[in-house]
Image: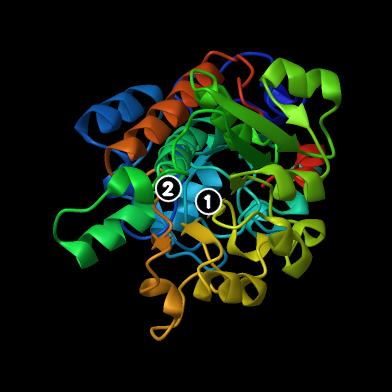
Amino acid sequence: MHPTTDEHDGPAGRPSGRPSVRPALLLSMGPGIADRLFDARHRSRLAALARTDLGLVAHELADPPPAVAAALADAEVLLTCWGAPPLTARVLDAAPRLRAVIHAAGSVKHHLTDACWERGLAVTSAAAANALPVAEYTLAAILLANKGVLHSAHRYRTVRGPHDWQQELAGAGNYHRTVGVIGASRIGRRVIELLRPFDLRVLLHDPYVDAAEAARLGARPVPLDTLCADSDVVTVHAPQLPATRHMLGVRELALMPDGATLINTARGSLVDGTALLPELLTGRLNAVLDVTEPELPPADSPLYDLPNVLLTPHVAGSLGTELHRLADHALDALERYGHGLPFTDPVRPEDLHHSA
């Protein structure tokens, strides 16, 4: 028996009243995602926590096939991931029992609409879990950048013989170098945390973080210009918003010291690519770019071949075995929901104005 509408009428993120007993659930995400997200252990746990057809994954909700339409009409919970279709007012009208959306990935901006908040849906995401591999990738990139690995690897391929590497790399190393972190997002904060064991100075630029909070994090708050001018490595972790588009442009990049490295694992739009390319072509700056604008650079882009650029195909986030962390996070949230407990990582509409 399904709970009536008023049995889960608490505020977003806090189911209230009598908890569901294995709530009806529908999976909704892009093709092939569910197979990579859930292994046999996850599928067994999901079947124990919810009433769902594990073989039915909704790729389309606006005009779904009959089986999906029936499951949507019955669903109390949607478990979504990358590629989930938008939850428009029309979709929600076809889902009268829906009470919660559990997103097994980071940002919900791609599929949640204003209608979801007007409906009062409880929403949670695995953004905290997805932040971990991005921060780990960034830490590795910072340490390798300060060691001059891009330069030395390229030169080693060229020299192929005895060479005074100590002399050539005399300015490299991680002792008392400065790292500038742009954005105290979940990922930015985790990066700062991971940097604590190292003899590095950390600067932070984030308009929402005051000096006291920055100090608690282990960083010194500075204006963006100061961060760019004083950092050996600049790493970007700000959200993609109209105000952050091309926040690193000609002027900011020109402030970066010769030989400095820019790391972008956030969104390609945060960096003005037309301003960055000349700095890379001359070799004045180095870059580790996991995201670009456009997301897939054209085949003739110099970024693929420049020796001072490490270009990766948006792999800093969860992939492979790391997807199982997202699944565990989502199923933990589902278990809490089933017991009538609030989500530990609720998503609220007011937070989306300054988050990814």
Question: Which residue is drawn at the image coordinates 83% and 43% (left, top)?
Answer: 223
Q: Looking at the image, is 343 positioned above or below residue 285?
A: above
Horizontal and vertical percent for residue 8?
68, 24
323 left or right of 84? left
Question: Which residue is drawn at the image coordinates 79% and 45% (left, top)?
Answer: 226
Cα distance between the residues tagged 2 and 1 = 7 Å
**Which numbered dot is residue 51?**
none
Question: Which residue is drawn at the image coordinates 76% and 24% (left, top)?
Answer: 214
Amino acid under disc 1:
Thr
**Which numbered dot is residue 316?**
2
Do callouts 2 and 1 mark residues in contact (Cβ within 8 Å)? yes
**Scheme by which the image is coloured:** rainbow
* Residue in front for this viewpoint, 315 or 20: 315
From this viewpoint, which residue is outermost toward the left? 161
- Report the number of numbered marks: 2
The residue singled out by tag 1 in the image is 265
Q: Looking at the image, is 239 positioned above or below residue 49?
A: below
